[in-house]
Amino acid sequence: MALFTAPPRSICILRLSAIGDVCHAISVVQAIQAHWPSTEITWVSGKIEAQLIGDLPGIKVVVFDKKAGWAGMKAVWQALKGQKFDALLHMQAALRASALSLGIKARYRIGFSKNRTKEGQWLFTNRHLPNTDSFHVLDNFADFARYLGVPFEAPHWNIPLSDDDRAFAQQQVNGKPTLIISPAASKDERNWLTERYSQLADYGVEKGLQVILCGSPAPREVALGEAISQHCQHSPVNLIGKTSLKQLTALLGAADVVVAPDTGPAHLATTQGTPVIGLYAHSNPKRTGPYNSLAYVASAYEQHAKQQHGKPVAELPWGTRVKGDTLMQDIQLDDVTAILDQLIS
């Protein structure tokens, strides 16, 4: 039975990070808005993620600065002082988020199902989603909507982009068939080999594609982009560190195909309807891969999971990861070019 039989007055979303997970959550929150347009929605978000959701229609965003520590938590609580929500959707099973939730008043404090929760989230909630067979992270988020009483079948996104953001993207693409490579994951071990990114870029050019590199201004990402460019026979357009988050979103939407490891831009591209070739070895792409492009994943996860855990992936617990600094090298260039050929043919 649904938790609400009539639209609740107010809901608070607690999902601080990361970009990919916030992309998943946007589709769920916007499904709630579409079903209950009168419900007031407040979203507590991280600083970077707020750049993406700060102007979503009908959502009040309260920013949590994790670098501020205790003072950052108190600032959020002060911003929400005097409010009591009908429901808090505690969509981040991390201890920091749970601690932050203590200062958010709500009648129902809803957490993940017992077979999906971790880090003691159940101690901070008074309602739990039913145990679920939902596998992808986005589908687990969608279980929150269903529990409330909101139907959810397929994700849809409406992320506002300014005319300037779109103009920037069109200027970079300039009407050419475009492959974007977003090479950097959150950890270097999850990046593909530099020389294979370079070989892929050259392959794309030879297939008639313009190749653009994108990513954040983090020094490690900038250095990776420079290394890829140096190994290329045909220099790609290197925009790593040269876009805002919204410019990047528009750029990904203007591309014909995106190649990325387990990183936020893969999911940003998904929100814009662009096919993504995902590169995975450390986590199950069926759980964390680009939601609408799971058929286009090049994965070494399955072989390493079986080697490290002694069981086929189907028999492993949800969320099982594998460890190692060299796993991504087992994704071959031919694995990726074959998928690219399929998408551009």
Image (cartoon, rainbow, N blue to C red):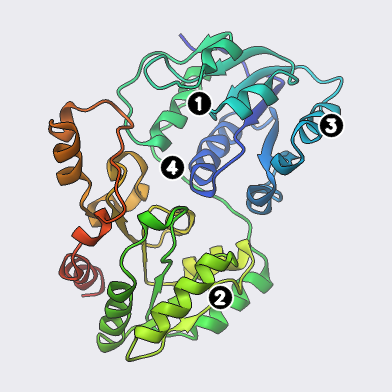
User: 210 or 193, which lies in front?
Assistant: 193
The percent coordinates of residue 133 (x first, y second) are 30, 23
Q: Quadrant of the C terminus?
A: bottom left
Residue tagged by mark 3?
79
For badge 3, the amino acid type reads: Ala
Q: Considering the numbered disc 2 on the image, is that residue within a helix, a strand or a loop?
A: helix
- What label does residue 169 carry, if any? 2
Residue 93 location in percent, x, y?
52, 26
Seen in the image, is 63 located left or right of residue 31? right
Q: Mark 1 Cα within 10 Å, few/some/many (few <14, many 20+)? A: many
Image mark for residue 190: none
Q: For the residue marked with disc 2, what is the amino acid?
A: Ala
- Identify the residue shown where x is 33% and y is 27%: 134
Left or right: 181 as drawn, with respect to 85: left
Residue type beneath disc 1: Ala
Q: CA distance from mark 1 to mark 3?
A: 25 Å
Q: If you read the primary sequence from the N terminus, does the residue marked by circle 4 or circle 2 appear first?
A: 4
Closer to us: mark 3 or mark 4? Answer: 3
> In the rendered view, would you say 143 is above or below 205?
above
Q: Nearer the viewer, residue 7 or 320?
A: 320
- SS state under label 3: helix
Q: CA distance from mark 1 to mark 2?
A: 33 Å
User: Quadrant where the N terminus lies?
Assistant: top left
Distance of mark 4 from mark 1, alpha carbons? Answer: 12 Å
Q: Which residue is mark 4?
A: 155
Q: Locate residue 302: give its quadrant.
A: top left
